[in-house]
Image (cartoon, rainbow, N blue to C red):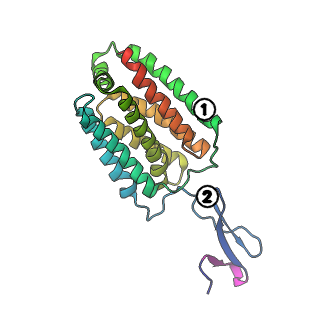
């Protein structure tokens, strides 16, 4: 009888062992040196992954809190409480379920952060140009204007901090926890489903342009997360975009 982690090879003479390398993939090698079994890559959901607890319930809770925050009086305590609450949901779930790394080798350093800042700046420019057109369409401009009232009537620095903290939480949840627990084998499939969930949760705020922005920002952030294997670049991208919208967009709409 073979021990745990060993598989009898053909003929019963050789013993195969399985071990994972540092990238998350796993190759089994027989005592004869032949490659055999491959285990799941890190970040791929197993049949027993807590999908509901790690993905659906937190997403639903965050959507409800964002909906409440968007309906709260502009700049009032309820807005800040609900928005911070959604961020806390993301952080708590990340602490419990976000221990696995994204696929790839993490590339630390200012180069990746700088690339995130650059992409975020491009997105800011694109959406500011779009805002010049949107303000001519009342049905689209009014929801955005209502959201921006939080920066006009509230405490600007507190609104900026709230926006930053929530953005970091979103990156942790949608770019790490969600892809790690979706029962989908292909990385593109996990990316698409994660993006769709991000758009749905963002749409709970009732601002159509935010849902459009979620597609662009989410796709760019997930690309950076998959490319670098970490969250520094996506967080930098998200922060530049959200702070740019917060500080500049009110001047245009």
Q: Residues within 10 Å of mark 1 (few under 14, many from 20)?
A: some
Residue sitting at 39 percent across and 48 percent down? 90
Quarter in which the N terminus is drawn? bottom right
What whole-number distance in Å separates the C-alpha atoms at marks 2 and 1? 25 Å
Look at mark 1 in the image and give the residue it sits on: 115
Looking at the rendered image, the disc whose residue lies closer to the viewer, 2 or 1, is: 1
Residue 183 visible in the picture = no
**Above or below, 115 relative to 4:** above
Q: Secondary structure at mark 1?
A: helix
The residue singled out by tag 2 in the image is 24
Q: Is residue 186 magenta?
A: no
Task: Please tell me how many numbered marks the rendered image carries.
Answer: 2
Which of the 4 quarters of the picture holds residue 62?
top left
Residue 97 placement (x, y as % from top left): 45, 57
Percent of width and height locating residue 220: 52, 34
Residue drawn at point x = 30 percent, y = 48 percent: 61
Residue 51 seen from this side: yes
Answer above or below: position of 39 versus 12: above
Q: Residue at x 36, y 18 (%)?
A: 250
Give the secondary structure at mark 2.
loop
Query: Which quadrant would residue 203 be assigned to in this image?
Result: top left
Q: Judge from the rendering whether residue 193 lies leftward or rightward of residue 70; answer left or right.
A: right
Callout 2: 10 Å neighbours few (<14), some, many (20+)? some
Image x and y of residue 123, in percent: 50, 25
Residue 208 image point, x, y percent: 33, 28
């Amino acid at each position: 009888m073979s021990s745990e982690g060993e598989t009898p090879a053909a003929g019963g003479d050789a013993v195969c062992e399985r071990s994972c390398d540092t990238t998350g993939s796993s190759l089994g090698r027989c005592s004869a040196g032949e490659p055999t079994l491959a285990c799941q890559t890190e970040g791929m959901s197993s049949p027993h992954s807590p999908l509901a607890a790690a993905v659906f319930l937190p997403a639903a809770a965050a959507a409800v809190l964002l909906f409440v925050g968007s309906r709260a009086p502009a700049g009032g305590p309820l807005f800040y409480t609900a928005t911070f609450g959604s961020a806390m949901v993301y952080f708590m779930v990340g602490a419990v379920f976000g221990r696995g790394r994204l696929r790839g080798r993490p590339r630390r350093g200012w180069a990746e952060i700088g690339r995130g800042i650059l992409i975020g700046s491009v997105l800011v420019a694109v959406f500011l140009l779009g805002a010049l057109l949107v303000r001519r369409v009342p049905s689209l401009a009014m929801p955005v204007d209502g959201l921006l009232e939080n920066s006009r009537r509230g405490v600007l620095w507190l609104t900026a901090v709230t926006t930053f903290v929530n953005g970091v939480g979103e990156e942790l949840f949608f770019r790490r926890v969600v892809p790690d627990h979706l029962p989908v084998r292909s990385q593109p499939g996990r990316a698409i489903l994660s993006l769709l969930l991000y758009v749905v949760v963002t749409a709970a705020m009732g601002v159509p342009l935010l849902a459009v922005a979620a597609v662009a920002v989410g796709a760019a952030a997930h690309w950076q997360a998959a490319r670098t294997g970490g969250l520094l670049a996506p967080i930098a991208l998200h922060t530049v975009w959200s702070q740019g919208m917060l500080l500049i967009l009110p001047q245009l709409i």
